[in-house]
Image (cartoon, rainbow, N blue to C red):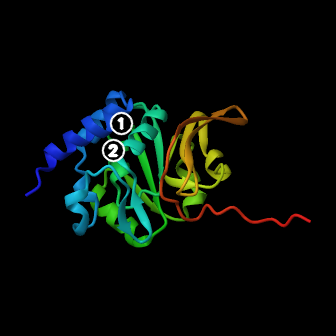
Amino acid sequence: MTDFAAARINMVENQVRCNAVTDPGVVAAMSQVPREQFVPATSVSIAYMDQDLDLGHGRYLMQPRTFAKLCQAAAISGNDVVLDVGCATGYSSAVLARIAERVVALEQDAALAQTASANLSGIVSVVTGPLSDGVADQGPYDVIFLNGAIPAKPEKLCNQLAEGGRLVAILGDGTVGRAYVYVRSSDSVTYRVIFDALAQPLPGFDVAQTFVF
């Protein structure tokens, strides 16, 4: 039988801390949330592997080190309101809820949203809807966290940031990518690249093709 507590400690020590994740809130939350409870039964034994885990429905649980580095880049405080985009089965929301004041979890797949609601037991508000639309009526948000790769800056989500709010996302196609943090200041949103990263694509963020003559 797998010793999940030991596996969780090994994940934090060998995948998170060794990749320059020093934020005490992130480290503590990932040390406490039982990742194995958020994956399909067939993947429980590999819940703490250093890889993206297939959740079904074309969705994945992000690699632990990438997830941790994004959380740290978001600089989440105990007073922050967070929008977790693409929460899937709810693992990311469970971690974020241990750091922030309030988390809104957005999931467009109805079956995954139902699973997330059951897994989170009311500690997080789970909303079902298109990921790219966000949840404007519960914002603005101090942090918006995207659980996967998208092809371009998510304008509609950036518009839901509070003053000084941060949006963290991986821009790429699943084969190459970089992690970005976008920051709202007055009427503008600036960005910086924070590290190279890969993640599975999130649905609903396709960029419309234009014809050039």
Looking at the rendered structure, the kind of residue marked 1 is: Ile
Considering only vertical position in the picture, is 118 above or below 181? below
- The residue singled out by tag 2 in the image is 95
Residue that extends furthest to the front in the rendered view of this protein: 175
Amino acid type shown at disc 2: Val
Task: State the residue at coordinates (84%, 67%).
Answer: 211
Label 1: few (<14), some or many (≥20) within 10 Å? many
Residue 40 sits above or below residue 146 on the image = below
Q: Are marks 2 and 1 in contact (CB under 8 Å)?
A: yes
The x, y position of residue 188, in whole percent, is 72, 35
Residue 77, relative to residue 87: is it above or below? above
94 sits to left or right of 59: left
Q: Residue at x 56, y 44 (%)?
A: 178
Query: Residue 166, how many percent across, how many down?
Result: 56, 37
Residue neighbourhood size for the residue with mark 2, other residues' Cα within 10 Å, grouped as few (<14), some (14–19), many (≥20): many
Using the numbered discs, state the Cα–Cα distance from disc 2 to disc 1 in whole angstroms.
7 Å
Query: Image check: 208 left or right of 133?
Result: right
Q: Position of residue 80 (x, y in %)?
A: 45, 35
Position of the C terminus, as image quadrant, is bottom right
The secondary element bearing badge 2 is classed as: helix
- Circle 1 is placed at which residue position? 99
Residue in the picture at 30% in, 55% down: 120
